[in-house]
Image (spheres, helix red, strand yellow):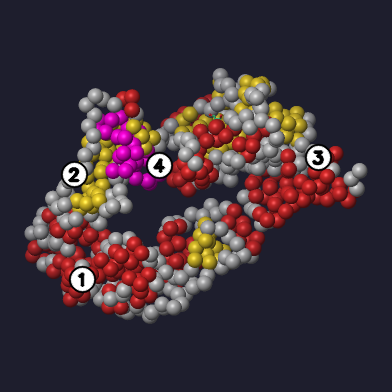
Amino acid sequence: MPTPAVEREIESLRERLDSWNYQYHVLDQPTVPDAEYDRCMQRLRELEEANPQLLREDSPTQRVGATPLERFRQVSHEVPMLSLDNAFNEQDMLDFNRRLQDRLGAAEAEPLEFACEPKLDGIAVSLLYRGGVLERAATRGDGTTGEDITLNVRTIASVPLRLRGTGYPDTLEVRGEIYMPRAGFEQLNARARASGEKTFVNPRNAAAGSLRQLDAKITAQRPLQMCCYSVGQVAGGVLPGRHSEVLECLQRWGLRINAQSKVVRGIEACDDYYRDLASRRQDLPYDIDGIVFKVNDLELQRRLGFVSRAPRWAIARKFPAQEEVTLLLDVEFQVGRTGAVTPVARLEPVFVGGVTVSNATLHNSDEIERLGVRIGDTVIVRRAGDVIPQVVSVVMDRRPANARAIVFPDSCPVCGSEVERAPDEAVLRCMGGLVCAAQQKAAIRHFASRRAMDIEGLGDKLVEQLVDEGLVTNVASLYKLQRESLLALERMGEKSADNLLAALEASKKTSLPRFIFALGIREVGEATALALARHFGNWEALASASEEQLLDVSDVGPVVADHLRQFFDSTSSMAVVNELRAAGVSWPDIEVESADLPLDGQTWVVTGKLELMGRDAAKGHLQALGAKVAGSVSAKTTRVVAGPGAGSKLGKARELGVEVIDEAAFVALLASYGVSV
Ligand code: IVH
C-alpha cells in the first residue's frame, strides 16, 4: 500500500506539472527550466510505476498510449459541427451586418458587438470533458459524424487531460482547431528531407496527416497545437452570456484560446480589425486564411439561429488567395549589381495576394530544374505579404505540346560580355563588370541609396537616363556632372538640376561605414561595413589589410575576405575610389576598437517583431558591436531585445531576471555607439 506521503507527493507533482504545462502551452509564459520539468516528470513516472494502483488516466505521464489502433471509431456529434458563410470584401461585410439588423429589429439595431478571431487553417475538432476529465476527442467529419481521435489528441500538450479550477459544467464539449505552427512545420519537413521521406505541402496537410495516425506515438512527435473557439454540448452548469466571456472561462479552465481575439463594436471596427490582422498575418507563427466575426451576445446568437449548415450570427472574411494559376508567357534575363543574371518569368497578369502580378523571379538554373518549368506552362504563383512573387509549381497535365525549354543566354543580355558560372554556384554572372550598363545602373542606384551615400533626388528613373545618355559610367562620374548637361536631359528643370547638384555636394561629407557600404562590394552589407570601419578606423588600413587581418574582424569570413581583397586588388575599382576622394568625398576617421568592441563578451537575444529594422538587421548591428546573438534565453544572456509578439523567450527572460529592452531603447543604444538605423 502506498503511504499517504507518497500519495501526497504524486498529487503535488501532478499539480505542478499541470500548472507548468498550462503556463507554457496555454498562457505562453514558461515558468520553469526544461530540466526541472523533466526531473519532476521522471519522478512522477517512477512513483506511478512503483504504485500502479495510483495511476490515473488524466495524469500528465499518460499522454502517449502504448498500442496503436486498427481503425478510428465513428462518433456522432450531439450538436452538429457547422461551417461558416464567407465574405470576400467590405460590401459582403455590410450585407452581413444589414441581414443581422433586419432580423434583430430596431431595438438591437446599432451598433452590434462582434467577437473577432483569426480563422486558423487547421483541422476542426471537438473535445468532450465530463466531470472535468477529457473523455473523447473527435474530428468534425461531415459535421454530424466524425472520427474518434482521442488517443492522438491526448498527446497534444495544449489540450488539458483534466480541466483546471472550478465552475465548469459537468458535460462540456469544447470546439476548436488543431494546427501546426509554421516553424514546427518547417522543422518537420527539414527532417523528412534529411531522411529522404516525403514532405508535407503545407502546415494544414501536416496537421491533418499527423492526426490521422493510428499510432499515437507518431502524433506525439508532431508539433501540434490546439486553439479553442466555441462550445458544443453543455450540461450540468451554466456559461456566461457572451461568446468572449465563454472563451475567457475556457482559458481559466486550462484551454488555449487565441491571443489575437478582440471584441469590437460595429461593422466598421470589424473592417479595421481585418486590415490590422491582414497586415500582420505573416508575423503570426501560424497560418490563417481569414477572420471570423461572431455576434458576441449569445442570446442574440440564439435568436438569429442557423441557415442550413451555417450560423446566421457569424461570417468568415477570407483573405485574398495567396496562390493562383496563370500562364508563363516568356522568361527574360535581368542583370543585377554583382552581374548575377536572373531569370524572370513574364506571366499572364493574375490577381494574387491582393495585387496583380505579371512577373515572378525564377532565381537560377537550379530552381528552374527543380520546378521542371517550360515556357508556355501553366504555373502556380504565390505571393505572400510583401514577399516577391514566386513560381511554386507547374501544372504538368496542362502542358501544351509546344512548350519550350528555358535556355540561358551564353552572353550578357545587356552588354554582350561573357557569362560564367562559378564552380560551386547556381548563379550565372556577367563578367563585364562596370562595362555592363545593367551593373553600372545597379551600382549607382546602390551608391545613391538612403543608407549608403544618401543622394536625395537621384532615383531609379534618373539613374537610367544618366547611364543611357552616357553622362555617368561609374559612381565617381556622378560628381563630375555639369548643370548644362543635366538640363539637356528630358524632363529636367532648372530647379531639379540644382537640387541634384546640391544633394551630390552634400553627400560628399559622409562616414567611413557608409562609404564602405556604398561601394557595393559583394557580400558587404551595412553591418559588415560598420564592423570593418570600427576595426580598421581608416580607409588606408582597411585597403591594405591582408586576408588574415580581414578575417580578424568579427563579421568577416573567408568569402567576404576574398571579395574584399579582390576589390582592393582591382586597379579599376581603386581608381574609382581615388576619383571619389579627389572629388572631395571624405569622412572622419574612427577610433579603432579592434581589441574590444563595446559589446564584446555579451550575449544578446532578439525576439518578437521589430518595426524599424528586421531581426536580421538587429542581429547584424549587435554582432558588429561585438555581441554574440543567441537563439534562446539562458542565464548567460546579457540582454533581450523584445518587440511586439514576443512569446516564450520574453517569458524566460523575465523568469531569469534578464534585462529586457524594447526597440526604442535598442535604437537609442545603437545611436550611442554611432550606429544609425
Ligand atoms: S466558428 C458555428 N471560429 O472554420 C461556427 N471556426 O468554415 C463554427 N475555424 O470548421 C466555427 N477558426 O474549423 C470558428 N475562430 C474560429 C475558427 C473557425 C477556424 C474553422 C473551423 C470550421 C471552419 C468553418
Question: Disc 1 designates what residue?
Answer: 574
Disc 4 beta carbon < 8 A from ligand 1?
no
Residue 384, numbered circle: 4
In the image, taking residue 344 as reference, residue 148 lies left or right, namely right
How far apart marks 4 and 2 lie (CA) works out to: 30 Å
Which amino acid type corresponds to the residue marked 3 in the rendered image?
A: Leu
Upstream in sequence: badge 4 or badge 2: 4
* Residue 140 pos. (x, y %): 60, 26
Label 2 crowd bin: few (<14), some (14–19), many (20+), radius 10 Å:
some
Upstream in sequence: badge 3 or badge 2: 3
* Residue 605 pos. (x, y %): 53, 61
Residue 55, numbered circle: 3
Of helix, strand and loop, which one carries label 3? loop
In the image, taking residue 538 as reference, residue 68 lies left or right, namely right
Label 1 crowd bin: few (<14), some (14–19), many (20+), radius 10 Å:
some
State whether residue 603 appears in this view: yes
Report the mark closest to the observer, 4 or 3: 3
Question: Residue at left 45%, top 45%?
Answer: 282
Stretch of the chain drawn in magenta: 365-391
Question: Disc 2 designates what residue?
Answer: 409
Tell me, yes or no, whether the highlighted magenta stretch contains residue 371: yes
- In front: 530, or 9? 9
How far apart marks 1 and 3 lie (CA) works out to: 77 Å
